[in-house]
Structure formats: C-alpha cells, structure tokens
Image (spheres, rainbow, N blue to C red):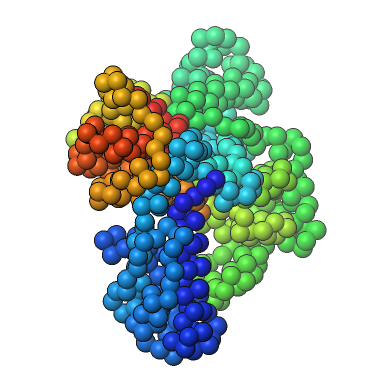
C-alpha cells in the first residue's frame, strides 16, 4: 500500500543525511560517522509537522554545539522533490519541517485510490497469529469480564489482520478436568434434591441458579429415571445433557456479540488424542519432572529461574517471586489443568501458529511466567507466547455500581448486557480503555443516542458526511476527483490538521498491532470525528470556488472512508443516516 507519511519520512531522512554529508564536504562539519537520529511528530504541531534530533544526536561525533550542527544541516538541506516546503531550527538544536501542498494532496489521493484497503500494511508479513480469548468455563454463564475480553480479543484480531498478519480467533472450551467433575456433582445433588429431602449439596459445588435450572429441566423431560442409577452414570448423563446447552448458549451469545471464532477447541480432545500424556512424557525425557508423594511434578522453579536469568533478571529479583514447582499428574492419576494448558499451547504451535496471544484476567498474572517457561521447556520460543492481562470491569448506572440484572434480579451475565445495551455500543465502549486499566462501563452512556456515547459520536460523523454528499448531489453538483493542484487549495489550519490525522491511520494500526492494544484505534477514530466536525464548522464545503468545493468534498469522502474502515474492521454498523 502507498503511504504518503512513510514516504515523507523516508525522503526527510535521506535529505538530512545528504545535508550532513554536504556540510562535511564543505568543511562546516568534521568527517565522522553519521549519528543515528530520529524523526518524529512534535507534540505541538504549530512547531512543525515533523522534527528531528539529528543535531543533538551528532554533538558528540561532530564535537560541535547542536545549534551549530542544526544550522549546518538547514543551510545545506535540499527539500525540492520532497513533501516538505521549509524547515527551521528551534530550542537547543531541534529542526522542524513543514509539509508542502503536495503532501496534503497525496494523502487524499492515497485514500481515494485504496478505498477500503486504506490503512492496511504489510507490517505483519503474513505471520500466523492466534488470538485466544474469552475461553470461559462452560460450567456456567458468561460474565462481564468475558464481555470485555470478547470485545478486546475480537478487535485485536481485526487490527492484526489489518496490519498484515494472518490472524485466527479461537475459544478454548475447558470440558474436562476438575471443574467438570464439580459441575457433575453439583448437577447430581440438585437433581436428587428434587426427589429426596436428605441430599446435602457439596461444599465446593456451583451455587448458580443455572445448575438448578438444568437439573429441573432434565427431571421435567426424563423424570426420576436417574434417581436409582449408579452415581457415575447419573453424573455423566446430567453433564452430557447440561454441558452442550451451556456451550450452545456461549456460542449464541458470542454470535449475538458479533464474534465468530475460527475454531472452538475442546480440551477433551487433548486427552482423547493422548496429547496431554505426550507433553508429560516430553518433559520427563528432558529431565524436568520428578515424583513425590505419588504425584508427578514439573520443575517449574528451575525452568523459570533459567529463563529469567537469560532475560537479565537478578537472582535477588527471582528470589522475591517465590517460584514453586507444579504438579502435572495428581495422586489419583489425573492430569492438572496446567498440564492440559501446556499441551494446548503446544498444539497451537504444532498447528503452525508463529505467535500465540492470550487474553487473560489480571488474576492470572502469576500464570504467565509459568507458561512462558513451559513453552521454552518443550522447545518453543517463549517470546512468541504473549498475554494481554485484562483488569476488572464494573457496571455503573446513575453513578452507582450495578451488580444485579433488573430483569432477573441475579448477577448480570453477558446475555443480560446484550439485551440492555446495543451490541455496537458495547463492542466500542469496551475498547475505549486499555486492557490493563480498571474500567467503569456506564450503562446510561451505552444506551444514549447522542455525542456522549462514543460509538454514536463516530457513527454520526459518518452519517453527517453521507448527508453532505447527498445534499450536494441533490443540488445538481457531482463530486469528482480533483487534481493535485486543486487539492493543494486545502490550506486552512482545520483542513491541514484533519489531513495530517488521516495520514497517520496506517501507522496507528501498526502501533495498535505492535502493542496488542485495539483501544488506540477507537481513540483514533473518535479524534477523526472530532477533527471532521471542527473542519466542517470552520470551512464551508459548498462555496463559490468550484475547485475548492470539490477539494473539500474529496476531503469529506476521505474522512468517510477512514471512519468506515475502522467501524467495519471492528464489525460495527456504519450508518449513512441517523
């Protein structure tokens, strides 16, 4: 994809290098190796569109004050045939550069030529990346953390795809292990309580009303046929009845949330295929297990210590972590959840994924190093296992925390939220705060149809542009492509600020992908809407100068394309009227 901003940066870097070499050849600077320098966008754009620290970076090698180096560079720089019209020095030696009209024209032409592909890049080089997110326990309903994790994970996968990765979405269903046994015992107790008075509910059982509902539904359909059955047969029958219903509800909630996974991966398949056992054998062959008290243990402390030392951590730092070894196979012969988790991540790498990204609740932070160590232990690069830790979310209404659903009087579930709040609003709002920050989700704002609601604000900007274009056509004016000279008429500060912002779209996508942070894009598109409204309120689109009018219509269309590309990337409706 063409990218005017990156072209401009490349032109500027070469122009600076050429200026330094010219200054060396005419004796203004001594002969020395050229210093590394950066080109960046100044915090205050009134100081320039791009700036460089080349003069300060060169002070040591050129043995000259930065101000003098800056003067040597600006005195010898050639900006012809670049996207810059002038430069000036500032402060202790910064050099600021200002775009020419050609830059602004080229940005709009990029958007026009690329359309829905605008903002895409080859940054990811087609690398296969799996994003595993939500992966809620199937023994109960999904909660608010799953709502936040769903929006973050789905939109992160979309950002990665836009940035040139081959991204894949997966949901890991924990349909084996201790939690399923607990689920079975809970269902059994609730079922038997329908027919008997002396049944004690397990202390560690699942207390949710959904357990009682499943037991009652089975009894209504099949009666007391399981009352006198063997306990194991009874539990298996109840789980086989209830678990598929829970999973189907999860799948329907995710679909309603506009999340469509490439695969729902079942933990039970790892056990059936023998992959869990194989990973224990692999670790044993590497000398990383031992037996104690009838269980098989993994040398987690040894592995993680070695990994942390390799990363440059001190022994004192490692000691404070109080690392411990982990059980792989319990005394009863059953593998632990950790063992299955290692096997699952090995399976991901074995399927050809080069980077694994997991969205986890912040309470799992202690598990990150264990899994990184385990990946290295089984022969994979631990740096290609990444975890996005997500903080808690609180629902707020009227300034007060809301814990119960008005409809059911019970703890609010994902399904309840999606009945009360528009899906687009939820997806956007959950992506307005970085994953590592606690979040208050304001139910009142989420249902508002005004500028207080961020997604409505952005959608309205798109609809407003559509309305402008329709009105222009109704007046008999047909928008057309403009020449570079005509686009060069866009010289008002509000026009230039808006075009500058559009130019950064691809870089914002890359930054969001590199940091695994899709919230950068919701902030970007919200700012796009703000700058558009600012432009529209300051610059009349329909005016007497036909060329200027067409240039402004082109700018409107470019903004419309950028907003649409973001909303469609995040699977959010992009209305043409509101």
| Res 126 seen here | yes
From the viewer's side, name the closer residue of 49 and 292.
49
Left or right of 279 in this view: 446: left
Image-quadrant location for residue 305: bottom right
Which quarter of the rendering shows the C terminus?
top left
Which residue: 41% across, 49% down? 503
Which residue: 19% across, 42% down? 538
Which residue: 65% across, 54% down? 327
Image-quadrant location for residue 481: top left
Q: Residue furthest right?
A: 285
From the viewer's side, name the closer residue of 403 and 169.
169
Q: Position of residue 58 (x, y in %)?
A: 45, 82
Above or below — where is 414 with respect to 65? above
Q: Position of residue 424 (x, y in %)?
A: 38, 30
Which residue: 49% across, 79% down? 22
Which quarter of the rendering shows the N terminus?
top right
Above or below — where is 158 with respect to 496? above
From the viewer's side, name the closer residue of 158 and 222.
158
Q: Position of residue 241 (x, y in %)?
A: 59, 19
Above or below — where is 286 with respect to 267? below
Left or right of 114 in this view: 479: left
| Res 566 seen here | no
Q: Position of residue 463 (x, y in %)?
A: 31, 28
Above or below — where is 551 with respect to 324? above
User: How many callouts does the rendering have?
Assistant: 0
């Amino acid at each position: 994809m063409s990218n005017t901003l990156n072209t401009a940066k490349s032109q500027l870097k070469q122009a600076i290098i050429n200026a330094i070499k010219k200054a060396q050849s005419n004796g203004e600077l001594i002969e020395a190796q050229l210093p590394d320098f950066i080109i960046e966008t100044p915090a205050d754009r009134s100081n320039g569109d791009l700036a460089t620290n080349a003069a300060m970076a060169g002070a040591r090698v050129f043995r000259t004050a930065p101000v003098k180096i800056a003067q040597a560079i600006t005195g010898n720089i050639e900006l012809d045939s670049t996207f810059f019209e002038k430069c000036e020095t500032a402060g202790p030696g910064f050099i600021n550069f200002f775009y020419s009209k050609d830059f602004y024209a080229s940005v709009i032409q990029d958007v026009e030529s690329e359309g829905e592909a605008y903002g895409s890049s080859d940054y990811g080089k087609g690398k296969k990346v799996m994003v595993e997110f939500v992966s809620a326990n199937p023994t109960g309903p999904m909660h608010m953390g799953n709502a936040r994790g769903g929006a973050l994970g789905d939109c992160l996968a979309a950002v990665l795809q836009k940035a040139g990765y081959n991204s894949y979405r997966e949901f890991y269903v924990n349909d084996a292990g201790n939690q399923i046994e607990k689920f079975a015992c809970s269902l059994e107790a609730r079922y038997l309580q329908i027919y008997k008075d002396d049944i004690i509910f397990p202390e560690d059982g699942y207390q949710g009303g959904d357990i009682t509902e499943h037991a009652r539904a089975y009894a209504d359909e099949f009666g007391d046929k399981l009352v006198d059955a063997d306990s194991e047969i009874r539990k298996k029958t109840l789980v086989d009845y209830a678990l598929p219903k829970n999973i189907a509800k999860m799948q329907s909630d995710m679909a309603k949330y506009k999340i469509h996974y490439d695969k729902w991966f079942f933990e039970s398949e790892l056990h059936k295929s023998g992959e869990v056992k194989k990973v224990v054998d692999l670790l044993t062959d590497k000398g990383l297990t031992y037996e104690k008290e009838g269980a098989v243990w993994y040398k987690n402390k040894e592995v993680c210590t070695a990994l942390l030392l390799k990363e440059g951590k001190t022994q004192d730092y490692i000691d404070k972590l109080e690392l411990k070894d982990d059980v792989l196979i319990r005394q009863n012969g059953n593998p632990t959840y950790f063992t299955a988790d290692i096997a699952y991540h090995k399976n991901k790498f074995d399927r050809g994924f080069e980077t694994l990204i997991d969205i986890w609740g912040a309470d799992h932070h202690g598990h990150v190093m264990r899994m990184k160590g385990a990946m290295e232990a089984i022969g994979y690069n631990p740096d290609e296992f990444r975890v996005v830790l997500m903080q808690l979310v609180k629902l707020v209404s009227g300034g007060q925390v809301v814990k119960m659903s008005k409809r059911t009087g019970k703890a609010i579930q994902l399904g309840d939220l999606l009945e009360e709040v528009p899906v687009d609003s939820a997806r956007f709002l959950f992506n307005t705060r970085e994953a590592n920050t606690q979040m208050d989700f304001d139910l009142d704002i989420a249902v508002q149809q005004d500028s207080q609601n961020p997604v409505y604000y952005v959608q309205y900007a798109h609809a407003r542009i559509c309305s402008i274009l329709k009105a222009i056509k109704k007046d008999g004016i047909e928008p057309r492509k403009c020449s570079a000279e005509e686009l060069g008429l866009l010289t008002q500060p509000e026009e230039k600020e808006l075009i500058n912002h559009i130019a950064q779209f691809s870089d914002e996508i890359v930054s969001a992908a590199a940091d695994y942070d899709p919230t950068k894009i919701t902030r970007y598109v919200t700012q796009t809407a703000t700058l558009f409204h600012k432009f529209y309120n300051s610059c009349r689109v329909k005016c007497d100068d036909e060329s200027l009018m067409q240039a402004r219509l082109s700018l409107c269309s470019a903004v419309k394309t950028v907003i649409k590309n973001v909303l469609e990337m995040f699977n959010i409706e992009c209305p043409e009227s509101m």
